């Protein structure tokens, strides 16, 4: 397995996302001191390509194109789905930042602004999850916070549209459904999976179920079956759910004795998913072959926190962790 890597010294990785426009580019959200104190940095990274030859990118590794600083830790990042140079980040100070100039032309001409275009602040505690709506919700941002609330934002307005209340503890993850308009899911350390309608301005959940007996830290939707979503917990379990029968999970995977920090359903295969884990591993699953992980990659020396599939390259995966290392590779089981 050929792996390209990059180290962000003194910055610990929390989240990374491939660009939906440029296959070689990704954004990495990081924090100082493991997110416990200090500032945060947003990195625009690139793999080698002939298109980026003007940037003198090393063929074997990933190169830092641009770095932007924030006064508190950055815990999540999301690309704007309709503008190739714009992205948003979520911070430990309870604010969202919208950045611009995250493209090669702006980097080469040194036109990337050092400060965000907009800063949105209403949450009272850390924001650990951020999702930028696509298709039906392309102009909206969804934030999930440790203040036990979620907020829906219009990226052109300074104030939130709706505050959603329904969890009793820290919210770690919230994701829009890619296949059902106005539906999103969230998970919390209260162990519950909540489903919401983004157009319900009363801000109450459509449904709430106990997904895990312990903390629920991650969730993701299938890109192929509109009824299927996954949750991951501190119990090391990944559970699959069907919107048509939510009384109990439809499958369960064991991802080790430590927490499942992030989940990513493949955009290229209906049965493939990946998990980022607190046992320092990234695991690849193919539900078509059974409930055992097809591959366990132990390339990190600390918690693995960030995970994303490249939407433009089949089966290419990136992960990042508290060891300050970013890896990009295609799992052996998928080659």
Image (spheres, rainbow, N blue to C red):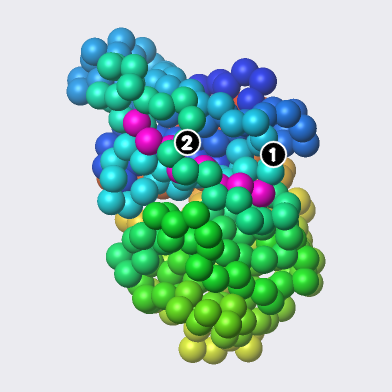
Question: How many discs appear?
Answer: 2
Residue 2: which numbered mark, if any?
none
Locate residue 13 relative to residue 197 in the image: left or right: right
The reply to whether residue 325 is in sight is no
Q: Which of the 4 image quarters holds residue 205?
A: bottom right
Residue placed at 32% from the left, 55% from the top?
Answer: 268
Locate residue 127 relative to residue 284 in the image: left or right: right
Quarter of the rendering occupied by the C terminus: top left
Residue placed at 32% from the left, 69% from the top?
Answer: 136
Quarter of the rendering occupied by the N terminus: top left
The reply to whether residue 73 is in sight is yes
Q: What residue sits right under mark 2 in the picture? A: 116
Do the numbered discs 1 and 2 sit on residues whose CB atoms are within 8 Å?
Answer: no
Locate residue 307 relative to residue 84 in the image: left or right: right
Residue 303: which numbered mark, if any?
1
Q: What stretch is highlighted in magenta?
A: 94-101
The answer to whether residue 266 is magenta is no
Residue placed at 46% from the left, 25% from the top?
Answer: 114
Q: In this view, does 274 lie above or below 297?
A: below
Mark in front: 1 vs 2: 2
């Amino acid at each position: 397995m050929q792996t390209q890597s990059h180290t962000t010294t003194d910055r610990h990785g929390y989240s990374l996302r491939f660009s939906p426009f440029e296959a070689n580019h990704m954004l990495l959200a990081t924090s100082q001191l493991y997110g416990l104190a200090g500032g945060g940095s947003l990195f625009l990274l690139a793999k080698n390509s002939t298109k980026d030859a003007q940037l003198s990118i090393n063929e074997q590794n990933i190169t830092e194109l641009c770095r932007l600083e924030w006064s508190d830790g950055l815990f999540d990042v999301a690309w704007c789905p309709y503008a190739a140079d714009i992205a948003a980040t979520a911070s430990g100070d309870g604010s969202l930042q919208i950045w611009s100039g995250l493209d090669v032309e702006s980097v080469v001409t040194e036109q990337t602004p050092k400060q965000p275009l907009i800063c949105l602040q209403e949450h009272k505690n850390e924001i650990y999850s951020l999702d930028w709506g696509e298709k039906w919700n392309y102009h909206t941002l969804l934030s999930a916070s440790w203040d036990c609330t979620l907020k829906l934002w219009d990226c052109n307005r300074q104030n939130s549209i709706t505050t959603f209340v329904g969890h009793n503890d820290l919210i770690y993850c919230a994701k829009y459904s890619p296949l059902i308009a106005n539906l999103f899911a969230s998970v919390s350390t209260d162990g519950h999976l909540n489903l919401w309608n983004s157009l319900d301005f009363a801000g109450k959940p459509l449904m709430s179920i106990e997904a895990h007996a312990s903390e629920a830290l991650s969730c993701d939707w299938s890109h192929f079956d509109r009824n299927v979503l996954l949750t991951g917990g501190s119990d090391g379990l990944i559970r699959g759910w069907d919107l048509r029968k939510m009384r109990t999970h439809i499958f369960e995977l064991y991802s080790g004795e430590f927490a499942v920090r992030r989940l990513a359903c493949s955009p290229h295969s209906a049965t493939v998913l990946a998990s980022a884990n607190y046992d320092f591993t990234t695991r690849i699953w193919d539900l078509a072959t059974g409930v055992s992980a097809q591959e366990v990659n132990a390339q990190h020396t600390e918690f693995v926190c960030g995970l994303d599939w490249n939407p433009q390259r089949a089966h290419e995966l990136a992960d990042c962790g508290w060891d300050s290392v970013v890896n990009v590779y295609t799992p052996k089981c998928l080659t």
